[in-house]
Amino acid sequence: EALDVVFVSEVGQKRFNYPHQLGGPDNGDAVKDVAISTTHTDIIPSTDIIVVYSDGVSDNLYPHQFNDDCLKFKFDKENNKVELLSHSWSADCIARKSYFLGKDKNFDSPFAQGGRESGFYPNYKGGKHDDITVVVAQITDEDEKDDPYYKDSITLYTGPVDDTMPTLNAIMHRRTEEL
């Protein structure tokens, strides 16, 4: 069995090699100003895997390259479900793969290809070493709460997406009070 990439959002950048910097009007681009027009509007099925990453990953890997070695899973044919064996191992593997490809001067990276296509870097070869952040998650049914860490992982912000969003410290403080 193999995993399929079913959705990839558009690259969040002003132009080639100028990604949006979230942080508000004084320290980057305001969240409301960088909304991406391509969104996934279908209901995300249970057991789908979501990978969120920084440009240090997308400069060196295409999403279809993640599952080659990194997204180890088992397939339950009886229930037609995929179970990711380790979220942290998968995230670390994608990060390490991106890191090493970013240092490879001969690799025809997505960044090198984009540089040629945009005309900004017509002779660029190799990967692009940059910051790397990867988060891997898997959708589960609401009734599948046998995860011992479930209660600690359900803090989600569902308010407005603008400059009035509470800080992470405020969210964690509120969550601590609830416990």
Image (cartoon, rainbow, N blue to C red):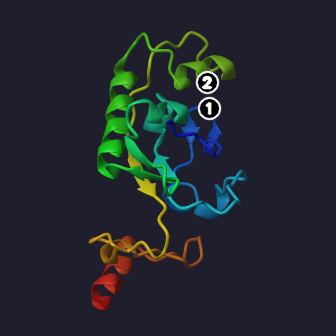
Q: Position of residue 2 (x, y in %)?
A: 51, 36
Task: Say which residue appears at 46% left-offset and 35% top-offset.
Answer: 66
Report the residue marked by disc 2.
114
The reply to whether the C-beta atoms of the residues labelled 2 and 1 are less than 8 Å apart is yes
Q: Is residue 176 above or below residue 120?
A: below
Task: Say which residue appears at 34% left-offset and 51% top-offset.
Answer: 87
Amino acid bearing label 1: Phe
Q: Which mark is residue 122?
A: none
The quadrant the C terminus occupies is bottom left
Give the quarter of the image for residue 94.
Answer: top left
Disc 2 crowd rating (10 Å Cα; few below 14, some 14-19, many 20+) is: some
Task: Say which residue appears at 30% left-offset and 49% top-offset.
Answer: 88
Task: Say which residue appears at 44% left-offset and 30% top-offset.
Answer: 68
Picture mark count: 2
Report the residue marked by disc 1.
16
> Spatial distance from mark 2 to mark 1, Cα to Cα?
7 Å
